[in-house]
Amino acid sequence: MLVAAAAGLGPLVAFAAQTQIFDPQTRTWVDYDARKARQYYARNKQVPDAFRRQVVPFRTAEEPGTIIIDGNQHFLYLVQPGGQAIRYGIGVGREGFGWAGIVRVGRTAEWPTWTPPAEMVARDPNAVKWANGMPGGPDNPLGARALYLYEGNNDTIYRIHGTPESWSIGLDVSSGCIRMNNDDIIDLHSRVKIGAKVIVLMQGAALYKGV
């Protein structure tokens, strides 16, 4: 079991396969699953405070412009000068689809085409009709923007991308990729340069490269 709530990083705790959020009314930690996430989003039209974009103190030896992804906490950090980072809430791969490693942003796209990998087509009947690609648009699973993660000159098939399912931020829901709400991925896309270093951390994840 992992409990990780660093000072100054907001009211969130994440277990290995269970997210919790702090309820200020009851002053207790409560489980945050897909059903509760949908209910919260329906009531508030946004995700909980912890998963909203914000600037936070962040100590690291990595250079500004580096992306650091904490899959357990469901946060993505874009390192800024002066010991700070922009923190975004994310959704991550379901248990069994997690990975960790050091890669780079190889290319980016606006309103990208989604082409499911062969493995997804084989296991997911809903992906079959898009085997040759789903055009970009508001219903596309990759959302408004995508950052394609490369190892050297090779596409890893992993992406940081938007989602039409904003309620899902903070959950373990996607098949190995990192999802963000569309406003946040548009903001991140506007700040990130091709070649930017991306460090992915996730307890118990399959090792991809470098960590």
Image (tube, rainbow, N blue to C red):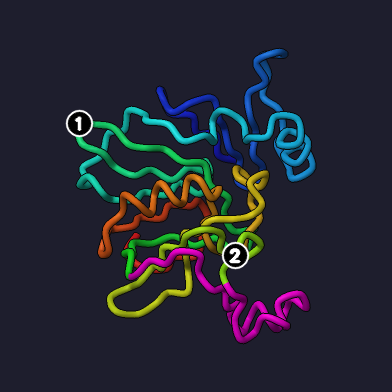
The answer to whether residue 63 is left or right of residue 20 is left
Residue at horizontal 59%, vertical 81%? 133
Q: Mark 2 points at which residue?
A: 137
Residue range highlighted in magenta: 107-135
Q: In which quarter of the image is residue 209?
A: bottom left
Residue 197: x %, y % from top left:
28, 58
The answer to whether residue 81 is above or below residue 187 is above
Q: Which of 188 and 197 is in front in this view?
A: 188
Foreground disc of the pair 1, 2: 2
The answer to whether residue 100 is left or right of residue 18 is left
Query: Which amino acid is tagged 2?
Result: Gly
The residue carrying pointer 2 sits among few (fewer than 14), some (14 to 19) or many (20 or more) residues within 10 Å by Cα, namely some
Q: Say which label, 1 or 2, has the lower sequence index.
A: 1
Residue 120: x %, y % from top left:
65, 77
Q: Is mark 2 on a helix, strand or loop?
A: loop
| In magenta stretch: residue 140 | no
Query: Which amino acid is tagged 1?
Result: Gly
Which numbered dot is residue 191? none
The residue carrying pointer 1 sits among few (fewer than 14), some (14 to 19) or many (20 or more) residues within 10 Å by Cα, namely few
Q: In which quarter of the image is the C terminus?
A: bottom left
Residue at horizontal 22%, vertical 45%? 64
Residue at horizontal 38%, vertical 62%? 101
Residue 70: x %, y % from top left:
45, 46
The answer to whether residue 18 is above or below residue 5 is below
Callout 1–callout 2 Cβ contact below 8 Å = no
Q: Mark 1 points at which residue?
A: 82
